[in-house]
């Protein structure tokens, strides 16, 4: 199970390092964030981030094919990512406590009985 749109903060994190284009972001999501997203969902997410002002999109000429859209995080996007991280830390604490409590009650080898 994965949080809905979880790849969006991952994209913002990748764009903190450097501006990039969609295809490369898709590859780097898998490599650096262990997050796999369909191409359609990725571009819908990128458009949503652009619409909200978290990233900007600029068309760049390509020597070998059609123009490419390069994405770059904005100041507002950095603040949005920081807020995501704060909330993920809180959620991590809650989830970790749930797992810990569960494991106290049930041995991990019993989880296969469900």
Image: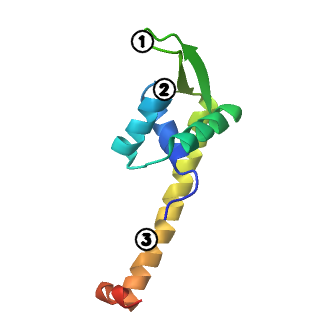
Q: Is residue 36 above or below residue 103?
A: above
* Classed neighbour count for the residue bearing mark 1: other residues with Cα under 10 Å, few (<14), some (14–19), many (≥20): few
Q: Secondary structure at mark 3?
A: helix
**Disc 2, SS:** strand
In-front residue for pair 107/27? 27
Q: Are marks 2 and 3 in contact (CB under 8 Å)?
A: no
Which residue occupies 43% across, 8% down? 63
Vertical placement of residue 35 versus 100, above or below: above
Q: Residue 58, how many percent across, how many down?
A: 59, 18
Q: CA distance from mark 2 to mark 3?
A: 35 Å
Q: Earlier in the sequence, mark 2 or mark 3?
A: 2
Q: Is residue 62 left or right of residue 107?
A: right
The x and y percentages for residue 30 are 38, 44
What residue sits right under mark 2 in the picture? 21
Q: Earlier in the sequence, mark 1 or mark 3?
A: 1
Q: Nearer the viewer, mark 1 or mark 3?
A: 1
- Relative to 71, residue 88 above or below: below
Q: CA distance from mark 1 to mark 3?
A: 48 Å
Q: CA distance from mark 2 to mark 1?
A: 15 Å
Write the residue at 38% across / 37% down.
28
Residue 74 occupies which quadrant of the picture? Answer: top right
Task: Say which of marks 2 and 3 sits in front.
Answer: 2
Residue in view at x 47 percent, y 63 percent = 92
Report the side of 24 relative to 8 (left or right): left
Is residue 98 something one can see in this rendering? yes
Residue 81 visible here:
no
Question: Label 2: how many residues lie within 10 Å, few (<14), some (14-19) or many (20+)?
Answer: some
Which residue of the protein is positioned furthest toward the left in this rendering?
109
> On residue 64, which mark appears?
1
Determine which residue is flagged by label 3.
96
Q: Residue 1's spot in the image, x, y percent?
A: 49, 65
């Amino acid at each position: 199970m994965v949080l809905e749109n979880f790849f969006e903060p991952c994209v913002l994190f990748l764009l903190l390092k450097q501006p990039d284009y969609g295809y490369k972001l898709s590859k780097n999501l898998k490599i650096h964030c262990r997050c796999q997203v369909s191409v359609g969902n990725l571009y819908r997410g990128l458009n949503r981030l652009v619409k909200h002002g978290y990233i900007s999109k600029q068309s760049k000429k390509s020597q070998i094919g059609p123009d490419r859209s390069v994405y770059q995080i904005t100041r507002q996007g950095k603040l949005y990512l920081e807020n995501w991280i704060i909330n993920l830390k809180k959620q991590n604490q809650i989830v970790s406590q749930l797992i810990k409590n569960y494991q106290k009650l049930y041995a991990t080898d019993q989880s296969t009985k469900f």
